[in-house]
Image (tube, rainbow, N blue to C red):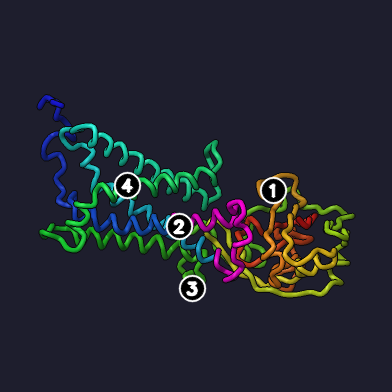
Amino acid sequence: MSWPAAARRGPFRAGAFRSSLHEPRTAVVLGRWLGAALLTCFLTGLVSHVLQQPPHGLAHLLPTRPVDGYRVTQGLHVASGIAAIPLAGAKLWTVYPRLFEWPPVRGVLHALERLGIAVLVAATLLELFTGLLNTLQWYPWPFPFRQTHFWLGWLATGGLLVHVAVKAPVIGEHWRRARAVVPGRRAFLVAVGTAVGAVTVTTAGQSVPWLRPLDLLAPRRPGAGLRGLPVNRTAAQAGTVTVPADWRLQVDGPRPLRLTLADLRQLPQHEAVLPIACVEGWSVSARWHGVRVADLLALTGAPPGSAIRVSSLEADGPYRVMEMPAQYADDPLTLLALGVDGEVLSADHGFPARIIAPDRPGVLQTKWVARIEVL
């Protein structure tokens, strides 16, 4: 394809970009950091997706230990996603003059390569943008967040792997050391690394206890809120501020039960120190007390190894009904909690009863429980 020389105007003209940092070695170093952050974010995101929506036939394989496994993986997911934001900005600044290379298209393969880069950049930026707003629980778009975020993750990761394969010769050439000294490169990389470290340590405290004194920019501060437990969905939002005076827990099994709150308090009580770990990245541990779910199921005559379905008093909501695989229902740490840290549950924390189980996302720790069904 022949392009007239007169078309080289503005950013297309020779010498339009003067910084010496628009060069391969800087791009490769930043690409390594960004690639590590994005792959970490993707893999930990898959863990979250599988725990919330297990693939058919695999629910029985989900682990209940370590008890704070989801706390770690989801905290790492959000931390690596936030760290990727300044890295993506620096990487794009380093390579954006390539958008204006001459000629703009050198053939079919070159056009396909540029199209692939466009898809990679668009998917990555949208993934990071929607993920960041999710930590704030702000959804100013018409599409469902979780499903969109999941498929954008696959699209961005696939685009990244294809891009690495296409650019492998350039990456290999500049991977180990710089071929020439470029003024300002070291200072630029140090500045980017400092920015990444700053946003990480000032936000990761919402899931890393020893970083909480530095938790300045995170949307949630564990320790704030009633009894030191933040609340995502309040009783007012769920319509459960007032519990019916005739509330009974319905337990459906071979021998169905209807239990009052007084009945539940007469059953053997147990304690478990477990975290509430939410998809937004925050987590906090508490001491819960109540009745073991396995004991309730045994009272109905349900055999060990029974999965259950738990329904909430709330009228609607995407997690009003939750299914729990058998290994969680059988676990001695899984409670129908009646209180936390020695106090009766508040309305916002799920009064009169809620589920608390090891290694489960917070959205599956159902509050305001009304019914438990043996499946």
| Structural distance between the alpha carbons of marks 4 and 2 | 17 Å
What's the residue at 40%, 60% (across, down)? Answer: 199
Nearer to us of marks 4 and 2 is: 4
Q: CA distance from mark 3 to mark 4?
A: 38 Å
Residue 129 picture location, percent across and down: 44, 46
Give the spatial CA distance, label 3 vs label 2. 24 Å
Query: Contact, CB < 8 Å: mark 3 with mark 4?
Result: no
- Image mark for residue 108: none
- Cβ–Cβ under 8 Å for marks 3 and 1: no
Q: How many marks?
A: 4
| Residue corresponding to mark 2 | 43
Residue 189: tell me if it is visible.
yes
Residue that carries the numbered disc 4 in the rendered image: 162
**Is residue 46 one of those drawn in magenta?**
yes
Residue at the outermost front position: 57
Which residue is tagged 3? Answer: 210
The secondary structure type at the circle numbered 1 is helix
- For label 3, the SS is helix
Say few, some or many: other residues with alpha carbon within 10 Å of mark 4 (under 14 / 14 to 19 / 20 or more).
Answer: some
What is the number of the mark on residue 237? 1
Real-space CA distance between mark 2 and mark 1, rounded to the nearest whole angstrom: 32 Å
Q: Secondary structure at mark 2?
A: helix
Magenta span: 42-70
Q: Label 2 near label 4: C-beta < 8 Å?
A: no
Which of 309 and 149 lies nearest the eye of the viewer? 309
